[in-house]
Every structure is written in structure tokens, then in C-alpha cells.
């Protein structure tokens, strides 16, 4: 059973930065797609950024140019560097993974989530 632990959330002012981390219980590289989702009350879940099992990276249009997804394979850790944060980025952020090349909106494994709050 794959386990994911999310961390790094917090409260920042508009324009600030945060780096989220997702620690996996085993190596994800080469076998799993990984994705950062976010969800705020009253809004649909959004796939913010993802890495396919072959290394292909994707971003939601709303975060492109501001967020960067990356992974440290030696540490079995996925990161989301978030810069130029906006109040609209406020949400619970979740790391997720699946044993497939490309993640769908419903991956098999999920972290517990970490809250990001951006004040104006």
C-alpha cells in the first residue's frame, strides 16, 4: 500500500511563496504518475500540476508561470513550488499518485492534504 504525506502549507500574503512537499513510502519514479490537486469550499477540484510516469509535466492554466512541480527521486518526494501567490490560490492542496503513465482526476493514492491560505 502506497502512503503519501503532504506538508508545507501555511498562511502567506498575496505575492508570497510556499513550497509543498509530498513524501512517498516507496519510489514513484518511472512507474507512477503524480499530481497536486487543490480544492476550496464551493469549488471543483483542480489538478494544479502533474508529472507523468515518463516525466512529462503539466500545469493548469491558472498557475502556469507561477508554480513549479518537481521530484527528488532519492528522497521519494514530490514538490510544488508556489510563487506569486494570489488569494484565489487559497485551498486545501493534496498530493496524489497512481500506477499509470498519466493521472486522471481520480488517482488511487492520496495524501492527507495541507492547507494554503493567501491573504490580500
Image (cartoon, grey):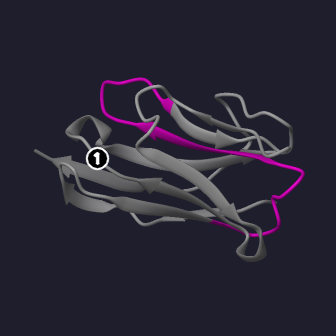
Quadrant of the rendered structure where residue 89 is?
A: top left
Does 58 sit above or below residue 19? above
Res. 87 image quadrant? top left
Q: Given the current orientation, which residue lies at the most extreme right position?
A: 31
Q: In the picture, which quadrant includes the C terminus?
A: top left
Q: Provide residue 44's location: percent of width, then percent of height.
A: 43, 23
Residue occupying image coordinates x 47% and y 34%? 64
- Pick the front one: 38 or 89: 89
Q: Is residue 68 left or right of residue 25?
A: left
Q: Is residue 62 magenta?
A: no
**Which residue occupies 30% across, 24% down?**
42
Q: On the picture, is 2 further left or further right than 95?
A: right
Secondary structure found at label 1: loop
Looking at the rendered image, the quarter that the N terminus falls into is bottom right
Answer left or right for 3 relative to 92.
right
Front-most of 27 and 107? Answer: 27
Categorize mark 1 by other alpha carbons within 10 Å: few (<14), some (14-19), many (20+): many
Tell me the quarter of the picture where residue 49 sits.
top right
Q: Residue furthest left?
A: 120
The residue to which callout 1 is attached is 85
Query: 110 above or below 37?
Result: below
Residue 43: x %, y % from top left: 35, 24
Q: Is residue 34 left or right of residue 5?
A: right
Identity of the residue drawn at 81% across and 59% down: 28
Label tally: 1
Specify the segment rendered in magenta.
Answer: 23-46
Magenta span contains residue 33: yes
Name the residue located 39 percent from the left edge and 46 percent from the top edge. Answer: 92
Q: Where 17 falls versus 54 (above or below)?
A: below
Amino acid at each position: 500500500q502506497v502512503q503519501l504525506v503532504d506538508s508545507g502549507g501555511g498562511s502567506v500574503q498575496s505575492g508570497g511563496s510556499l513550497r509543498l512537499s509530498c513524501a512517498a513510502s516507496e519510489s514513484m519514479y518511472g512507474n507512477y504518475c503524480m499530481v497536486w490537486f487543490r480544492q476550496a469550499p464551493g469549488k471543483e477540484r483542480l489538478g494544479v500540476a502533474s508529472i507523468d510516469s515518463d516525466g512529462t509535466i503539466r500545469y493548469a492554466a491558472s498557475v502556469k508561470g507561477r508554480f513549479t512541480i518537481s521530484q527528488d527521486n532519492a528522497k521519494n518526494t514530490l514538490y510544488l513550488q508556489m510563487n506569486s501567490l494570489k488569494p484565489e490560490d487559497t485551498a486545501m492542496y493534496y498530493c496524489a499518485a497512481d500506477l499509470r503513465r498519466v493521472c486522471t482526476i481520480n488517482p488511487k493514492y492520496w495524501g492527507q492534504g495541507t492547507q494554503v491560505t493567501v491573504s490580500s
